[in-house]
Image: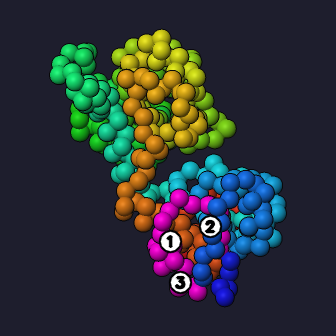
């Protein structure tokens, strides 16, 4: 029997070989559940030493029920499924993986941008529908010299910036937490959100989802955008107020959208976005590649292995938990 109980609260994966390879070194075998509700997590996780979490809610109610848990490690960069404050209060370490899909998401954002700009998806659909006529895509504007606005300027949008600049795009960004010197080094100008909306021909959203960012792109922001502008979202759906987006598209306040994420996933069959030819929809796939998934799974498990071995993990979300937990720093 394993010395520790490590529970995967929920999952969409077919294999756990990368996690098990890491945890085998500590003689740990994973335990699995498919929790969807708080009560299901409480029942499955109350005696766990560690949780690995995908989408199941790790709320304050859940955290207060945990009897032995030392660490919660999340599959992903975001950690909006976890009440981090509650975990910190209870001395539970929260880990994520901040660097596993930088190329994948930045490539996907550029793919949505390029397909929107060159109307590749629209043209593909019209050809397959029996129409051979480039004029259905008019107008298309030259990419070089246009402006890309990045909402957020962390690791992924910084990677987007480099790729966009290779296409001749001017890049500006909004991020109140990034120093101007860091942006200047990348030839990116930091601006206010209002200025970004006014100046950008393309807006790519990369903000994390939290109480400050939910709905941050809404009616006021769309009213400031150019009619030729496209908005791209590979972050989290609720960062964009979807009702405001739909209204902006219907009223032709913007030219289109490329969306990998939505407020409600999977998309509901009556969502008006499904009937809009100038909207590209993907099923929250930007993070994925074979390599990225394997890397994510290894690093998620390593967070757990580190804590259960007495170390702070490399990817520590709640750094102020150090006031309650005394572990060793990794060299």
Residue tagged 2? 8
Q: Residues within 10 Å of mark 2 (few under 14, many from 20)?
A: many
80 or 130: nearer the viewer: 130
Query: What residue do we see at 47% from left, 69% from top?
Result: 15
Query: What residue do we see at 61% from left, 53% from top?
Result: 55
Task: Provide residue 73's location: percent of width, then percent of height.
Answer: 61, 64
Rounded to the nearest angstrom, the CA distance separating label 2 from label 3 is: 15 Å
Residue tagged 3? 24
Q: CB under 8 Å between callouts 2 and 3?
A: no
Q: Which residues are magenta?
A: 6-27
Q: Which structural element holds mark 1? A: loop
Q: Identify the residue at the far top of this view.
A: 251
Residue 25 lies in magenta, yes or no? yes
Q: Is residue 149 visible?
A: no
Residue tagged 1? 16
Rounded to the nearest angstrom, the CA distance separating label 1 from label 2 is: 10 Å
């Amino acid at each position: 029997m394993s010395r520790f109980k490590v529970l995967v609260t929920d999952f969409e994966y077919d294999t756990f070989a990368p996690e098990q390879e890491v945890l085998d070194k500590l003689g740990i075998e994973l335990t699995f559940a498919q929790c969807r509700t708080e009560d299901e997590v409480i029942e499955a996780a109350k005696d766990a030493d560690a949780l690995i979490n995908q989408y199941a809610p790790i709320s304050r109610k859940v955290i207060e029920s945990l009897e032995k848990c030392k660490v919660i490690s999340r599959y992903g960069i975001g950690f909006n499924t976890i009440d981090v404050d509650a975990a910190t209060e209870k001395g539970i370490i929260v880990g994520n993986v901040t660097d596993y899909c930088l190329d994948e998401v930045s490539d996907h954002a550029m793919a949505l941008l390029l397909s929107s700009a060159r109307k590749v998806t629209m043209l593909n659909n019209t050809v397959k529908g029996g129409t051979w006529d480039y004029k259905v895509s008019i107008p298309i504007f030259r990419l070089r010299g246009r402006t890309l606005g990045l909402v957020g300027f962390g690791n992924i949008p910084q990677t987007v910036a480099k790729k966009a600049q290779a296409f001749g795009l001017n890049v500006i960004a909004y991020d109140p937490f990034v120093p101007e010197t860091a942006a200047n080094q990348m030839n990116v100008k930091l601006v206010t959100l209002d200025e970004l909306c006014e100046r950008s021909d393309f807006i790519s959203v990369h903000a994390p989802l939290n109480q400050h960012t939910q709905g941050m792109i809404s009616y006021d922001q769309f009213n400031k955008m150019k009619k030729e502008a496209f908005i791209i979202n590979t972050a989290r759906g609720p960062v964009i107020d979807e009702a405001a987006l739909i209204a902006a598209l219907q009223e032709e306040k913007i030219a289109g959208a490329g969306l990998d994420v939505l407020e409600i996933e999977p998309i509901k069959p009556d969502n008006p976005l499904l009937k809009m030819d100038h909207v590209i929809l993907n099923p929250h796939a930007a993070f994925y590649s074979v390599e990225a998934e394997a890397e994510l799974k290894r690093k998620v498990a390593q967070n757990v292995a580190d804590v259960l071995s007495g170390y702070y993990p490399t990817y520590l979300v709640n750094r102020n938990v150090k006031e309650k937990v005394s572990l060793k720093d990794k060299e």
